[in-house]
Amino acid sequence: MKMRVLTFGLLIVCVLAAVESGIRAAPARDLDENLIFFENNQDEKGYNFAYKTKDGQFREEQGVINPETGVLTVSGVYGYEGPDGKTYEYNYESDENGYRIVTKPPPVGFAPIPNAVLLSLVG
């Protein structure tokens, strides 16, 4: 009897995990009709997400938790297509020192950027 309960409990956990991962990785068209691309990943080290909309808006962000200090460091880029047809892009960082726009791309190495995200930003 204990084995059946344990097996059933394990089955429930596996099903819930599969459903949750399916929701987080849902195709963009199922989330909002204006989205072209959406990705959201989380783990014990931090998170990353990215999206792009039909009107040219985009955002990509990575957050990493420092295991020694517990400080969350966030870096990313957001942008949009202006009325003049040009793409405007802003890189930013945020940590214990606050939020700030940076003039250079955020340092590499915070969290890997999936190839699908990079390709979606190219067009």
Image: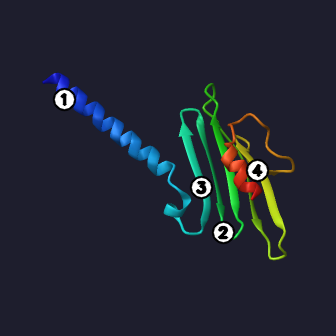
Q: Amino acid at mark 2?
A: Lys
Q: CA distance from mark 4 to mark 2?
A: 23 Å
Q: Is residue 92 above or below residue 52?
A: above
Report the residue that reaches farthest toward the bottom: 83
Find the distance from the CA under tag 4 to the CA under tag 1: 50 Å
Front residue of this view, candidates 95 and 38? 38
Locate residue 71, reporting x and y percent. Answer: 64, 35
Viewer-side residue, 52 vs 27: 27
- Please give the label number shown on residue 67: none
- Closer to the chain start, of discs 4 and 1, is 1
Q: Residues within 10 Å of mark 3 (few under 14, many from 20)?
A: many
The amino acid marked with disc number 4 is: Tyr
- CB of mark 1 within 8 Å of CB of mark 2? no
What residue sits right under mark 1 in the picture? 5
Horizontal side of 77 relative to 9 (left or right) equals: right
Q: Is residue 106 left or right of residue 28?
A: right
Instruction: Tell me which label, 3 or 1, sits earlier in the chain.
Output: 1
Q: Which residue is mark 4?
A: 92
